[in-house]
Amino acid sequence: MITQSDNRIIGIMGAMPEEIAGVLELMKDVTEHEIGMRTYHQGKINNTNVVLVFSRWGKVAAASTVTTLINLFKIKQLIFTGVAGAISDEINIGDIVIGKKFFQHDMDARPFIQQFEIPMLGVGHFEADAKWVNDAFEKLNGAIENKLLYHNEHPTYTSILKNQKALIGDIASGDQFISNESTRQNLIKHFPDLMCVEMEGAAVAQVCHELNIPFITIRVISDGANSNAPIDFAEFVSHVASKISKNIIKFLIT
Ligand code: SAH
């Protein structure tokens, strides 16, 4: 395990095992560490020290994983990738959301504090590193324009991904897979600027906020958070997610 004080050790967390498999192909000098039911892959991508791990699903799993990355592996920055359900009508399956603000949509300690406010912190959301977000936006849109992010290997996704784009937007997280229209509409009512929903990002954002680690979260849209979501999600993950995530990491760690 690296314990030297390298200021650039980057933690890479993926919320799907398929993504980890893709990113692992980019790594060199890999050693593996089993801790708390997770496998942490330590090594290098383009001469940058990285630690790659599958977060598992949900807020607690993701929070405990990022805490280990920070406290044990001494990462100094974090990239978190995964898939997500679309909330905004602006986005489609295959689009990429670079998270700006992160909300915990299932946090509700009323009547003591306002709905969605995080206990003890007095805030209703967390924010990703603004400079890194803008940098990722440029790099990923550049890669999309040059057709370098996803090659047309799968017939169904060739047309779906034709108009792929990367956007900066807000993300809500909660311990719930959203797959019906009324829950989706309820989220829009509470968070009008929401771009997508998932199950980990805002928990990771809270840990990074409390431990002062700059982070970005990149989510690829796998479904529309509607009744078709379980099918769209499963197909997207098995056919596309790992290839896109691998390329996202390739463009972000240069
Ligand atoms: N396939 C897993 C469950 C995955 S949970 C199993 O068999 O147990 C869904 C994952 O995709 C989470 O990482 C979540 O962040 C993301 N996600 C994608 N679409 C979502 C949606 N519509 N609602 C909530 N999370 C979603």
Image (cartoon, rainbow, N blue to C red):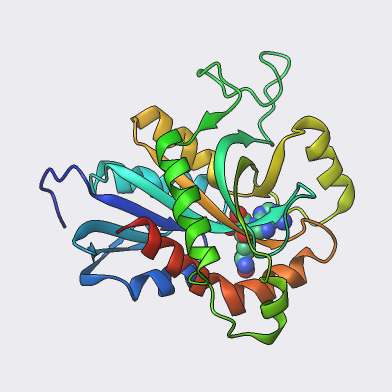
Q: Residue furthest left?
A: 4
Q: Quadrant of ligand 1?
A: bottom right
- Quarter of the image that includes the N terminus: bottom left
Query: Which image quarter holds the C terminus?
Result: bottom left
* Left or right side of 94 for 210: left
> Hey, which residue is sitting farthest front in the picture?
146
Q: Is residue 121 above or below residue 179?
A: above
Q: Where residue 9 sits in the image (x, y, percent)?
A: 23, 49
Question: Residue 99 location in percent, x, y?
Answer: 55, 43
Q: Is residue 165 visible?
A: yes
Where is residue 195, by image quadrant? top right
Corner quadrant of residue 116:
top right
Q: Is residue 75 above or below residue 109?
A: below
Position of residue 60 relative to residue 147, above or below, is: above
Residue 34 x/y as whole percent:
29, 64
Q: Residue at x 54, y 45 (%)?
A: 201
Judge by depth and name the residue closer to the eye, 64 or 201: 201
Identity of the residue drawn at 43% across and 69% down: 246
Residue 242 in picture, x, y percent from top left: 50, 72
- Residue 56 can be seen, yes or no: no
Q: How many marks?
A: 0
